[in-house]
């Protein structure tokens, strides 16, 4: 499989290493030094694109891949105000698009655990829930896409909560997401249920970017020959 890498920072390089280790070829690399090389003509050299770029670049990158009829796997967060538009365009015009806020297999298990615990905790009003996410100082968006996914899953299941807020909780119906930027932390997410009696926590802590890269390459492999919009639930079967 020939892969176009859109974004060649830490994650892009990790994806390159993982893809080559799995026998794939990198046919095109786009970073801040050669953005003009992202053309429909150059993309025809690839079977699939993997985007770990920037919030400002992700949407135009996706549209360029759609124009080139190249499947795209996107792991960039911070652009989701355009997400519904992209999914609608993908489905209406027969494109191939795979999106996840986090490609780690462990995080996606964590997502399911979060949903299950939230269903239980919906019955216990004495517990207040909150989210903490910790990432490296280079991360451009806050809160993380993973934290937003966790919050949305909580909001769907805990009836006493109706929104999330960054670094605050203005009233009891709000879920506080604390965003911490620290050193080179690849990604830690903690869900806390706190009462006057005790505290319950679940936590996922990435040890490196390798797990994210593997998930993205598996998504690219999965997307071959498919049309439409897919997520990690489709890939993992839960």
Image: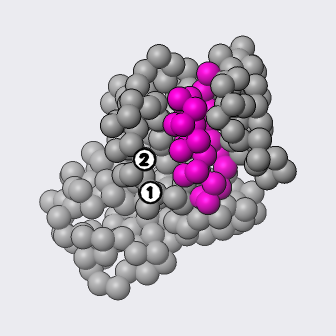
Q: Say few, some or many: other residues with alpha carbon within 10 Å of mark 1 (under 14 / 14 to 19 / 20 or more).
A: few
Q: Secondary structure at mark 2?
A: helix
Task: List x then y, in percent, for residue 189.
Answer: 51, 56
Location of residue 138 with respect to 51 vertically, above or below: below
Q: Is residue 206 left or right of residue 193?
A: right
Location of residue 89 with respect to 55 vertically, above or below: above
- Whether residue 113 is visible here, answered yes or no, is no
Q: Which residues are magenta?
A: 47-74
Q: Is residue 186 left or right of residue 128?
A: right
User: Residue under circle 1?
Assistant: 82
Task: List x then y, in percent, for residue 13.
Answer: 77, 38
Task: List x then y, in percent, for residue 116.
Answer: 27, 45
Q: Secondary structure at mark 1?
A: helix
Q: Is residue 89 left or right of residue 139?
A: left
**Residue located at (30% from left, 71% from top):** 163
Asked whether 105 or 234 is in front, the reply is 234
Residue closest to the far right: 33
**Callouts 2 and 1 close, C-beta under 8 Å:** yes
**Residue located at (53% from left, 29% from top):** 69
Residue 144's tag is none
Asked whether 47 or 157 is in front, the reply is 47
**Residue located at (43% from left, 61% from top):** 81
Residue 86's tag is 2
């Amino acid at each position: 499989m020939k892969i176009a890498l859109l974004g060649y920072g830490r994650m892009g390089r990790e994806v390159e290493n993982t893809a080559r280790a799995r026998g794939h070829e990198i046919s095109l690399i786009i970073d801040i030094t050669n953005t003009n090389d992202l053309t429909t003509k150059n993309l025809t050299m690839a079977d699939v694109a993997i985007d770990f770029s920037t919030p400002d670049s992700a949407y135009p990158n996706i549209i360029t891949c759609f124009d080139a009829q190249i499947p795209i796997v996107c792991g960039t967060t911070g652009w989701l105000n355009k997400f519904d538009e992209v999914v609608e365009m993908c489905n209406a015009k027969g494109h191939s698009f795979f999106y996840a806020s986090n490609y780690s297999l462990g995080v996606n298990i964590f997502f399911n655990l979060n949903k299950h615990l939230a269903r239980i905790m919906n019955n216990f009003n004495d517990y207040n829930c909150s989210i903490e996410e910790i990432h490296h100082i280079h991360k451009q968006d806050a809160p993380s896409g993973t934290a937003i996914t966790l919050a949305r899953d909580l909001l769907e299941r805990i009836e006493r909560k109706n929104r999330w807020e960054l670094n605050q909780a203005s009233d009891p119906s709000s879920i506080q997401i604390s965003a911490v930027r620290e050193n080179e932390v690849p990604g830690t997410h903690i869900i806390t249920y706190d009462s006057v009696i005790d505290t319950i926590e679940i936590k996922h802590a990435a040890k490196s970017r390798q797990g994210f890269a593997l998930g993205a390459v598996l998504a690219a492999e999965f997307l071959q020959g498919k049309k439409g919009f897919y997520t990690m639930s489709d890939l993992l079967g839960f």
